[in-house]
Amino acid sequence: MRDLLENISRFPKFFILIILGVFANLLKPLSPLMQRPVTAIAVVGLLVAGLTFLTLTLQAMLGRTQV
């Protein structure tokens, strides 16, 4: 039983590491674009706009709108 609890307690650490690895691999191709200020502003703007769109869409789908 103790081994089972030890194994279960390791899962959150592995989950966090997997999520961080996915984000690192998704953001790595964007690093060359961050060298020029114009493209860096465009990339950051697109990321913010995408996250805002996703947030607003999910809130509307779940009925959590504040209108």
Image (cartoon, grey):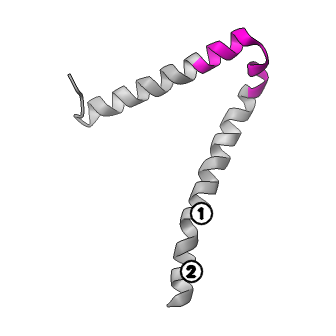
Residue farthest along the top direction in this orientation: 38
Location of residue 54 in the rendering, given as x and y in whole percent from the top left corner: 42, 29
Location of residue 15 in the rendering, given as x and y in whole percent from the top left corner: 57, 58
Location of residue 24 in the rendering, given as x and y in whole percent from the top left corner: 69, 41
Circle 1 — which element?
A: helix
Dot 2, how many residues are within 10 Å of its Cα: few (below 14), some (14-19), or many (20+)?
few
Magenta span of residues:
31-44
Circle 2 — which element?
A: helix
53 versus 41 height, above or below: below
* Magenta residues, dominant SS class: helix
27 versus 35 height, above or below: below
Q: Is residue 49 left or right of residue 59?
A: right
> Which quadrant of the view contains residue 44?
top right
Which residue sits at x=73%, y=12%?
37
Which quadrant: the C terminus? Answer: top left
**Amino acid residing under circle 1:** Lys
Which residue sits at x=63%, y=48%?
20
Residue designated by label 2: 6
User: Upstream in the sequence, badge 1 or badge 2?
Assistant: 2
> Which quadrant of the view contains residue 46?
top right
Judge whether residue 39 is colored magenta. Answer: yes
Residue designated by label 1: 13
Judge whether residue 60 is colored magenta. Answer: no
